[in-house]
Image (cartoon, rainbow, N blue to C red):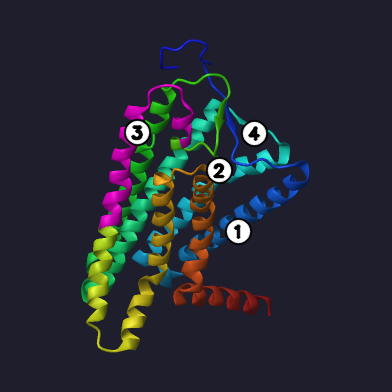
Amino acid sequence: MGGEGTNITSEPRFFIFAFSISENQRLIILTVFLVIYLIILSGNLLIIALISLESRLHTPMYFFLCNLSALDIMYVSTVLPKLIYVCHTGDHVMSYTSCMVQLYFACASGSVESYLMTSMAIDRYVAICFPLRYSLIMSKKVCVLLAFPAWFMSLVNASIFPYFVHNLTYFGLVVLKSFYCEVKTIMNASTSDNTFLKTTITISIIYIGVIPSCLILASYVRIIYTILKIKSSAGRWKTFSSCSSHLTIVVLCYGSAIIFYFSQSHEQEVVLSFMFVTLVPMLNPLVFSLRNRDITQAIRRRIDRRITRQV
């Protein structure tokens, strides 16, 4: 390992210590995590299946939503299975390799989500501000050019965090006061100087958080300005409802992330981190389906077809 200290383990082990539960509570927590995981998997798989099977949903907005659902599945699958294992066995220790893999995919997922949210905001901006040119501007090629770099750059850039974490110094069993291997928590558990890593995180936040959030904000300023010019209140509401689902997830996602990274309270960090990892992926299918007529109609059509076939 990088560093000049002595008695440094060549491959440290990490102890996940976000919560302490008794034997009686373990089954309850295990059931809760398992139910949350199954809800997230089933909800997002349903969204992907509907968008793939329904030709009416082959539009830019649902293309990005399909990407978001795939991302949510990847994100929670890097965190919740380990938590379920911890609750089942009581073994809180995670190997160095497992921790680095979890760290990598967690960082990549956060980055991809930010870029996808930005792409969805751009899509809503074009749809509302340039409705007559929407199909021309948001072509399949443009959608791919927005989505593919988001995945590629995020998966490449995420590799820098395991690299820098690898060069930190650790002594003995590393206690992480979190429920997964998160870069901020690992950095605080290290005994070496992490100034450079803090600088890297700050730069990453600018590219992953600040710039995308500014683009989203600019898009919605223009969207709101366009909506306010609509004369009828019914028309204004109908137009706004087309982007309300996305705006809800943006506020929840960015709000919890901002508070987490600037929080000084450990308890608050754990709660917000849990919300970011589980609540947002669980709410995505619900928000986009319950508040989206196209999705609900697609579900009804599928149910009607299944009933017709059985009859």
> Which one is nearer the viewer's eye here, 203 or 127?
203
| Circles 2, 4 touching at the beta carbon (< 8 Å) | no
Q: Quadrant of residue 135?
A: bottom left
Q: In this image, 145 relative to 166: left or right?
A: left
Badge nearest the viewer, 4 or 3: 3
> Which one is nearer the viewer's eye here, 61 or 32?
32
> Which one is nearer the viewer's eye here, 277 or 310?
277
Q: What element carries label 1?
A: helix
Which residue is identified by label 4?
92
Residue lying farthest to the right in this orientation: 24
| Circles 3, 1 touching at the beta carbon (< 8 Å) | no
Which residue is at a point 45% across and 31% down the rendered structure image? 188
Q: Residues within 10 Å of mark 2 (few under 14, many from 20)?
A: many
Which residue is identified by label 3?
198
Which residue is identified by label 1?
39
Identity, as a three-letter code, of the amino acid under mark 3: Lys
Which residue is identified by label 2?
79
Q: In this image, 122 relative to 176: left or right?
A: left
Give the position of the N terminus as an image quadrant.
top left
CA gap, disc 1 and disc 4: 24 Å
Which residue is at a point 53% across and 42% down the rendered structure image? 78
Q: What element carries label 2?
A: loop
**Residue range (magenta):** 185-214
